[in-house]
Amino acid sequence: MIRPTGRNEVTVRRHPGQRKAYQSERRFIAIISGTQSGKTSFGPVWLHREIERCGAGDYLVVTATYPLFKLKLVPEMLRWFVDLWGWGEYHASDRVLTSRDGQTRIILGSAQAPSGLESATAKAAWCDEAGQDAFRLESWEAVQRRLSLAQGRCLITTTPYNLGWLKTQVYDRWRAGDPDYDVIQFKSIDNPAFPREEYDRAKRTLPAWKFAMFYRGEFTRPAGLIYEDYDDETMAIEPIALPVEWPRYVGIDFGAVNTALVWIAHDVERRAYYLYRESLEGGLSTAQHASKALSHATVERVVGWYGGAKSETQQRMDWRASGVMMREPTINDVEAGIDRVISLFKQQRLYVFKTCPGIRDELGTYSREVDEMGQPTEKIRDKETFHRLDSLRYVISGATGGGMFIG
């Protein structure tokens, strides 16, 4: 660690978990640990070293939400880079830390605005609280794109909150032996400053799942997870050859910014379904979306297109006008549609290709809000953001509900 020019030497004491992360040379390093275990305070230390290693240029720091950005991330960055080291100056209007020589920038952002992450080519990145529901797969993919030119490294620091992309795209890859990934897990109590009495109190009073996630940094199935019968380890499969004679169905969730499509193949003999293609795009006209979809249908036997809520009649008419014989889903009630999908998972009749990370992320994140006692309520958390799962609900209700439309 370098010493700050004209200032006192900074001594950094790292506990064993932090030391292990600091010594890791993997490209993607994830600290997945308990609350108040020393995650966020470690991020600036790691990033500072990456800047010293990689030299002048742009670096990226992203947290899950704007409140976290304002109340947690910015103060931590300023404490380290400005107050302790005098490294540079923070420009609040641009959300950028600039080095004193003007040669290096640290761009700070929120995962709730993933388009804002596309503006820089970064040499390294730090993603804080990336396990939160608000830090979606699209933001993680945007960070990776920003690092691709420099093949830059990335540090993730978070407590686990769900079974979404952090587990399927990072933790599971590390566990499978992918040499690009490293995961370091430790408990809240591994931070010497964390009170043992508070740790023991949480263990006595919290539901087991919440204590495991929030104080031990372990993945477990949280209360309220709607598709709890989906097991990514057994139901997410490597792509298989799909016979051309198998009927295909397409589910579509309309949206000017987020139009989602999922494609299902039906093994009629085994009565099994395979979700083999997904997309989530914006900025296209209905005709353009339809044209892209129909390009697949020229070589695949698509027998049913299902999309939209009951009220979205005009959108279905627009798709039909563009050549896609769109039908209203046969089940319009949200809960009834969810039950139909759950039934297939329970019967182990619905599988997902591993090449569809978006739907796998949503399956591990889609949940009901919980009350103050940790019990699920009927309300679905952030329901309007799960576009792929809406498409899945539409297509499964159509594919299994009769009344098939031949298009």
Image (cartoon, grey):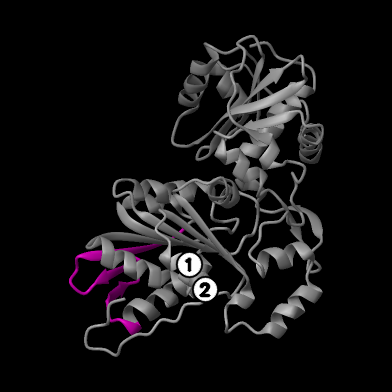
Amino acid at circle 2: Pro
Query: Element under label 2?
Result: helix
Residue located beneath label 1 in the image? 20
Residue neighbourhood size for the residue with mark 1, other residues' Cα within 10 Å, grouped as few (<14), some (14–19), many (≥20): some
Bounds of the magenta span?
A: 83-110
The residue at the point 54 percent across, 55 percent down is 135
Q: Position of residue 94 (x, y in %)?
A: 32, 65
Q: Position of residue 298 (x, y in %)?
A: 52, 11
In the displayed structure, 291 sits above or below 262; it is above
361 or 110: nearer the eye? 361
Kindly check if marks 2 and 1 are in contact, taking CB atoms under 8 A apart as contact.
yes
The residue at the point 41 percent across, 57 percent down is 154
Q: Position of residue 63 (x, y in %)?
A: 48, 63
Residue 397 visible in the shown view: yes
Report the side of 137 relative to 346 (left or right).
left
In the displayed structure, 95 sits above or below 294; it is below
Residue located beneath label 2 in the image? 16
Q: Quadrant of the image for the N terminus?
A: bottom left
Q: Quadrant of residue 388?
A: top right
Q: Quadrant of residue 95?
A: bottom left
